[in-house]
Amino acid sequence: MSPIFMALLLVTGWGIFAYSARRRWKLLMVGAPENRFDRPAERLRRTWTYAIAQLRMRRYPLAGAAHMLIFLGFGVLLLRTLILWGRGFDESFNFRLFGPDQLLGQTYSFFKDIFAVFVILGTLVFLYYRVIKRLGRMTLSTEGLVILGIILAMMVADILYDGASIAGKTKTPSVFLVYEPVGSVLAQSLYGWDPFTLSILKHVGFWTHSTLVLLFLNLLPYSKHFHVITGIPNVYFQSLHSPGRLPPIEDIDGRLEREETLGIRRIDQFSWKSILDFYTCTECGRCSDHCPATKTGKKLSPKHVTLDLRDFLYNQEKALVADKINGDAQEHRKDLVDGVIDPEVLWACTTCRACEQECPVFISYVDKIVDMRRYLVQERSEFPAQLQTAFRGLESNANPWSFPSDDRAKWAEGLDVKTLAEHPDARVLFWVGCAPSFDERAKNVTRATVKLMQLAGVDFAILGTQEQCTGDPARRAGNEYLFQTFAKANVEVLNGYAVDKKKIVTTCPHCFNTLLNEYPDYGGKYEVIHHSTFLAGLIAQGKLKPSRRVDKNVVYHDSCYLGRYNEIYDAPREALRSVPGLTVLEPKATRDRGMCCGAGGAQMFKEEEPGTERVNIARTQQLLETQPDVVASACPFCMRMLTDGLAAHNRESIPQLDIAEILLDSM
Ligand code: SF4
Ligand code: SF4
């Protein structure tokens, strides 16, 4: 076509892109080091599942299909673009075996045409969401429309090039090239046009497509569409740890004492992977759409946490990169908290993981939010006043309510429960937890669980006064030091009784999660079983036989730390369904989309942000919509929140029961 112009176009387009990519790379390298290069096979498996097959997008059928069409179309059309660029130098250019007379070339040409139409359809779906439906969760910027316009124009230009080429080469209107179906359809309407006009159309199509591809490429690093480039790497480098494990602030060798600041104070203290997260956000808003804090009117919107951090990062780019080179730090030393992120935003998070579960590109939130809380708590001693009471209780009595630690096993009086000190050979350690030890309502669940284990002949014991809080509320509230104190002390006690050779059963999903997923970092690797799983197992083995009919409709509420954190959804339902006559109801928001009760992430120990709806009231409303006779849960925190929620709705007449209580009632 025009070798000189094509050479200029390619050199300019790729040159500018190389400059932008280098800028983004240097900024990425400003982040703290983090090893995300382990277990490549697992990473590739997840990349295939979530980035290529886009499993998470199946929750959004139309948008998911549109994404898939555009994604596949781009993959197929990449080769076409290379061929067109080659034709800028030699009009008959084709890659070997891809000539118009070769089977491979014709096959490719056929699919290329089909996928060009797919991309057009996908783009129209996105335009529908942006222009007609105007989904509130999305960022409806002009930039998005420009990018969609470019994609649409690229495809139309490609078809125009083909159509004008076919019409120019063939004189007979009846000729239809099966291997270029879409171009042939267009050619039908162009037959008879004079050769000069056809040549102009062909050139317009050719240069429009060739140029727009480069324009599109160069807009990516400066737009939310950067995810077209960073999305697959971001999925590949996702955390492979259990989501229930918060990354330790240190690595058990005393780094806690050596760290310059505890937690995240500055933007460059986030790791390079966090910066990749910032680059990758598509601004789709699915995270905020499912966030209980956003839903109830709190200042926290996870999408905006990412966007605010990303914008700040971009604004400070020059200073950050210069400081990285010079080993100095100036302007970007501004505290993120207050400076960029309002502390109220951080304290509104229940750590429920709904945002992370929903994000199609695996952007993490809980670790970032807790890291900023760590800085607030440990460096600035700034946190909601009510948390001070919980911290004091933990420090003085090893429970957040300051109940005397000597009373920890009082619930067991009269139940013939032995401690491990009395019965060290017990096969099961029943880890009771703070709320189930001290809270009057939760103690009922503890006793019910004990009675069920006794009925099933389980050989178990408790730690009694040797048990302390796992440290979960302290850790989620940012008090890492306090958490570690408990983790190390508990692991020492547990290992002293060789609990690594026993099973641990607990009724509390927070204890369950911390013992299972976080204590391994401190030398405690245990088989931990939530009581829902354990009881369902005893029923399956025939050791427990619920027989008394309970003719009730029971709605089950999923605990975040059981469900989204540890994928335990079926066991509580199986246990409930084993009760004759009982019907399990599902709220609209259920299982991995279940709404948080509002207690996690240390929210249980602080007031909700004033002037906003309470999360537990909103969740209880969802449960009430199923018109249940009973509201069931499997977590002492959820129990407290839902009981309060029922009271707020003036529905105290509906019992709020743990699955253990329902089972015991049926025995
Ligand atoms: S973890 Fe839950 S509360 Fe926190 S930002 Fe995510 S969705 Fe919102
Ligand atoms: S963080 Fe994920 S879910 Fe939230 S807006 Fe960005 S891409 Fe969408």
Image (cartoon, helix red, strand yellow):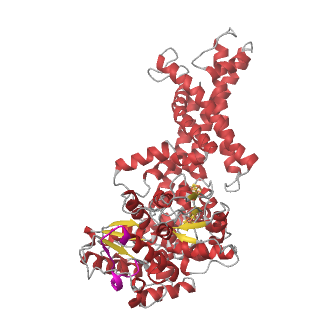
Q: Viewed as shown, does residue 496 lie left or right of 53? A: left
Q: Nearer the viewer, residue 430 or 514?
A: 430
- Residue 166: percent from the left, percent from the top? 64, 16
Q: Viewed as shown, does residue 393 lie left or right of 136? A: left
Q: Viewed as shown, does residue 38 lie left or right of 536? A: left
Residue at 26 percent across and 82 percent down: it is 422
Task: Inspect the magenta stretch and tell me whether residue 54 lies in it.
Answer: no
Q: Quadrant of residue 160?
A: top right
For the record, the magenta segment spans 453-470
Quadrant of ligand 2: it is bottom right
Q: Nearer the viewer, residue 192 or 235?
A: 235
433 w.r.t. 543: above or below: below
Quadrant position of the C terminus in the picture? bottom left
Residue at 37 percent across and 49 percent down: it is 42
Is residue 178 something that shows in the picture? yes
Q: Quadrant of residue 72?
A: top right
- Residue 383: percent from the left, percent from the top? 54, 82
Residue at 52 percent across and 52 percent down: it is 361
Quadrant position of the N terminus in the picture? top right
Q: Residue furthest top?
A: 172
- Residue 90: percent from the left, percent from the top? 53, 22
Q: Residue furthest front?
A: 548
Is residue 2 something that shows in the picture? no
Q: Nearer the viewer, residue 78 or 659?
A: 659
- Residue 373: percent from the left, percent from the top? 51, 76
Q: Nearer the viewer, residue 621 or 344?
A: 621
379 w.r.t. 323: above or below: below
